[in-house]
Image (cartoon, rainbow, N blue to C red):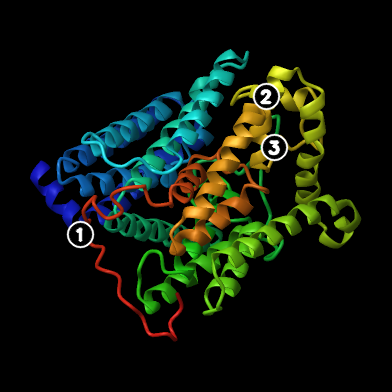
Amino acid sequence: MIAAARTAVRGRGLEAGLLAAGAVLVLVGAGPARAAPGAPQVALYAAVLLLGALAVAAATAAPALRRVVALETALLLVVAVPFTRIPSSGELIASVGLVVAVLTALALRRGGPLPRGTWLVAALVVVLAAATALAPDRYGLLRLAPFAVVFVAVFLLFGGAGRGVRVRTLRFAVLLAVVQGVLAVLEPLLGSPRLWASAKITADGVEKALRNPLLPGLERSQGTLGHPLALGVLLVIAVALLVRNAAELSVRTRVLAAVPLVAGLVLSVSRNSIALAVLLTVVFVPRWRFGRRAVLVAVGIAAALVVAVLVAAPAVEALLASGSTTHRTGALEAVPGLLTRQAPLQVLLGNGWASSARMFGDGLLQNDGLQAVDNELVLLLSQGGLVAVALFVALTVLAARRAEPALLPVVLVIAVTALVFDVLAWPSAAALTALALSSAPSRRGRGRQGTARGAPPRRREPRTASA
């Protein structure tokens, strides 16, 4: 069995096997997770650990292939199972964390170059962990664990990888997004099963459907991500990988992949992701003649416009007809209170990862009844204080300045999305954020990690092709 696993990793068997394993995880776990926690979920825990055991067996191969196994397994787990959305999921979180941690340790056991910004990531995790440990909230460190394990693992693995590993991993990310796009199309046809958990649950524990404003009568699709916005992040990241061909796919493959991605975005009704996908297509698909500095300036203007729209939301709410806009405006309005109504230590180091419910109750965050901040910078200000915000901004700036040109769109997507969504609060989005922020090549060994079979040398395309 181990020999067969090693052979499969070298070819396309790893990706096919992971997709099959993901399907099994969903089939085995989604029903019991929605019905009731407890004994039925034991099968899900066992399936997760079995997947990890097989991956560990396969990871005895070459160093580059071990990185591929660890990266793709981590991405598969956080996309297939929204484990932080499952009630009483402590054992499941521990299982996923164990699998990802063991695979990461195996992949890095011979060392290798550290990604740029590693010390920033370490400092961010330490600050959040310290604030969480000192906070009175129950199970705070357990709730922090999914972010810490997944974010650190993906950052170290992808940031220190060679080109072959990166390309193969990015192709798998696109493949996952395409599968989720297809599933998003099928959800309305299947009666909107809302796999795993409903996107919205009232304070009384009652599920509330999120209706599709573009297609009346349907619910918003969410795939296996647990929420339409989390699905939108995955889909727009895949679009960002296609517009500059970071995954090194043929033009025909990219066009075919774009169809379910666009359909999934429409059915998720993630307005922010849809707008970003359109902007990416307009800016990056044509062969405009401008350099990195012009791109960064354009994105800075776009980010400023986003903030301006949020600030001006009360005046245009009648036109926008969306409470989501005023909710995000409320996040910005909460900043003065977070800076002036707390003790200096909380302003500097925050209140811990699991403090949001307490902060909403104290009136320091939005008061419109929706207990989600929908702004990662404001959420970090609440959880980790000014120090955490500064570290995250520094990571984003470093990635934007140093990212490979093909991965710059991914960094920009994360930078803008962080203004309207809690990208670190969802394991799937946190993994994609880590991938984006580690896109700057390490200081040494850009291609020394070896190549992973399945990632051929870059081919120059005709000038008429999209890049």
Check whether the beta carbons of the residues at disc 2 and disc 1 lie within 8 A of each other: no
Quarter holding the C terminus is bottom left
The residue that label 3 is drawn on is 378
Q: Which residue occupies 38% across, 85% down? A: 462
Going by the numbered disc 3, the residue's amino acid type is Val
Could you give the CA–CA distance between mark 3 and mark 1, rounded to whole angstroms?
42 Å
What label does residue 147 carry, if any?
none
Could you give the CA–CA distance between mark 3 and mark 2, rounded to whole angstroms?
13 Å
Mark 2 Cα-neighbour bin, 10 Å: few <14, some 14–19, many ≥20: some
- When asked about the image quadrant of residue 12, the answer is bottom left
- Residue 120 falls left or right of residue 109: right
Compare residues 33 and 414 and report the one nearer the observer: 414
- Residue 44 seen from this side: yes
- Residue 194 seen from this side: no
| Residue 240 pos. (x, y %) | 50, 63
The residue that label 1 is drawn on is 453
Q: Secondary structure at mark 3?
A: helix
| Residue 289 pos. (x, y %) | 55, 78
The residue that label 2 is drawn on is 348
Check whether the beta carbons of the residues at disc 3 and disc 1 lie within 8 A of each other: no
